[in-house]
Amino acid sequence: MDVADTDDRVVPLRGARAMIADKMLSSLQGAAQLTHHARADMGAMLAAKARFKAEGIALSVEDLLMGAVVQTLGRHPDINGTLKDRSITLSTSVDLGVAIALPGNLLAAPAIFGADKMTLPELRAARRDLSERAKTNKLTVAEMTGGTFTVSNLGLSRVEQFTPILNTPQIGILGIGRVVETAVRDGDGIAWRSLTGLSLTFDHRAIDGAPAADFLTDLCQTIESFAP
C-alpha cells in the first residue's frame, strides 16, 4: 500500500460550507438557546393524509406538519419573529423557513412568505419550489434572510429527537424527528401509537421557558386533533 493512501483527507472550510459554519457558530455564540422536547401522537394527522390521498390530493406528513406549525404560530405571536440589536420584532405574517439539505454537505433554510395565508396544497407547492430552486442556487437574498420561524425535518432519517440550532436572528426553530410506533397505556391495556419527536429551540432572551412550552404543548394538541 502506498504511504500516501493512508494520509488523512484535509477538507478546508471555504465557500458555502464556510459560510454555514460561521453562521452556526455565530448563532450559538450570540443567542441564549434552550430546547424543549416533546412527543406528539400522529394518528389524526396520518388519517388526514390518507383522506387527502383518497380525494386525489397528494400531501406529505411534512406538509401537514407545516400547516399545524403555521396554525399554532398564529396563536403564539411572541415566538414568531426576530431579535436583533436588542430589539424584538414580532411579525404579523408567518414567513416559514424550511431547512433543506443540499448536495455537498450544504444547508439552506429559505422562507415561505405569507405561509399563514396559504392552503395546504399551496404550502406544499411553495416548499417544493424552494427545494428545487435551492438545488440550482436560485434563491433570493430575501428568501434566505426573511423568515420569522424555521422548521427542520429529519423525519425520514432514524433521528427521533435532536437539538436544532437557531436560524438567527429568528426567535424559534422546530426540529421534527421520525415517527416511531410506541406502546402506551390505554385504560387497563396497552395500545400502539405513532409518536413523533418535536424539539423547539428558542432564544431565551426573547421568550421565557413557560410560554415556549405553551407553544409546544399547543402544537402537540393541534397535531393530535388535526383538522385541516
Image (tube, rainbow, N blue to C red):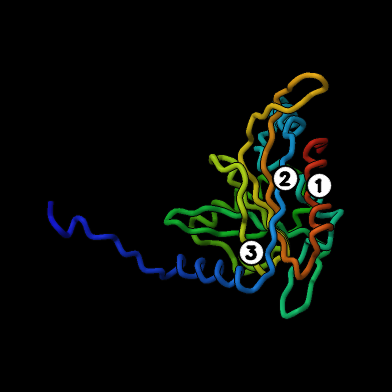
Query: In the image, is residue 45 above or below residue 26?
Result: above
Label 1 with label 2: CB-CB less than 8 Å: yes
Please, what secondary structure does the residue beneath circle 1 have? helix
Q: CA distance from mark 3 to mark 2?
A: 20 Å
Q: Position of residue 22 (x, y in %)?
A: 52, 71
Viewer-nearest residue: 17 or 204? 204
For image coordinates 80% across by 37% down, the residue present is 226
Q: Residue at x 75, y 31 (%)?
A: 48
Q: Which mark is residue 217?
A: 1
Numbered label tally: 3
Q: Who's the residue at 46% across and 67% down the image? A: 16
The three-letter amino acid code for the residue at tag 1 is: Thr
Q: Quote the CA–CA distance across marks 1 and 2.
A: 8 Å
Q: Position of residue 179 (x, y in %)?
A: 64, 35
State the mark number for residue 167.
Answer: 3
Q: Decide which of 164, 124 is in the foreground and name it.
A: 164
Name of the residue lying farthest toward the top: 189
Query: Marks 1/3: CA distance?
Result: 22 Å
